[in-house]
Image: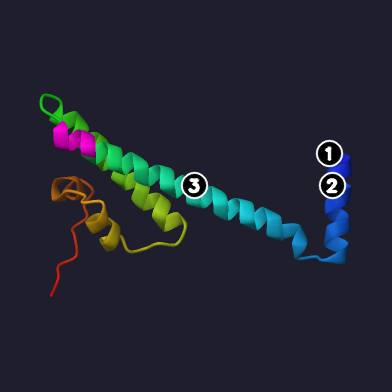
């Protein structure tokens, strides 16, 4: 089965060389989007857990910081360098950002 797939891809590349990578590029982009969406959901959940935390607030704060940091890294890996909009959209609390060493941009 693997050889027939390889042969098919080789044939496609011979006819249209760009088509050999187009499917793979599309799959990579879809995986990036899915991964970024999952990271955003983790941030939303962690911030909600922090907002309702009572006795385990320090643990929830640490978890929120970890999830936000991972989300920012994921965003940067796909090319998004500015986080100001998502900080506002997701309502990431200043106490979470302070633990990352990040400060929200000041408005003029």
| Rendered residue at 19%/65% (across/down) | 105
Image: 50 above or below 39: above
Image: 106 above or below 2: below
Give the x, y percent position of residue 85.
28, 62
| Quadrant of the image occupied by residue 63 | top left
Q: CA distance from mark 2 to mark 1?
A: 6 Å
* Local secondary structure at mark 3: helix
* Local secondary structure at mark 2: helix
Residue situated in front as seen by the camera: 96 or 35: 35
Q: Is residue 70 left or right of residue 91?
A: right
How crowded pointer 2 is (Cα within 10 Å; few <14, some 14-19, many 20+) is rated as few
- The part of the chain drawn in magenta is 48-52
| Rendered residue at 19%/60% (across/down) | 104
The answer to the question of whether label 2 and label 1 lie on touching residues, with beta carbons closer than 8 A, is yes
Determine which residue is flagged by label 1: 2
Determine which residue is flagged by label 2: 6
**Which dot marks residue 34?**
3
Q: CA distance from mark 3 to mark 2?
A: 27 Å
**Magenta stretch mostly in which secondary structure?**
helix
Quadrant containing the N terminus is: top right
């Amino acid at each position: 089965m693997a050889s027939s797939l390889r042969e098919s891809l080789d044939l496609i590349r011979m006819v249209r060389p760009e088509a050999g990578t187009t499917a793979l590029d599309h799959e990579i982009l879809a995986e990036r989007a899915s991964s970024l969406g999952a990271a955003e959901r983790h941030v939303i959940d962690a911030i909600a857990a922090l907002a309702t935390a009572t006795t385990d607030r320090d643990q929830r704060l640490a978890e929120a910081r970890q999830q936000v940091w991972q989300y920012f890294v994921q965003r940067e890996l796909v090319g998004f360098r500015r986080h100001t909009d998502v900080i506002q959209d997701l309502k990431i609390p200043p106490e979470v950002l302070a633990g990352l060493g990040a400060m929200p941009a000041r408005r003029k």
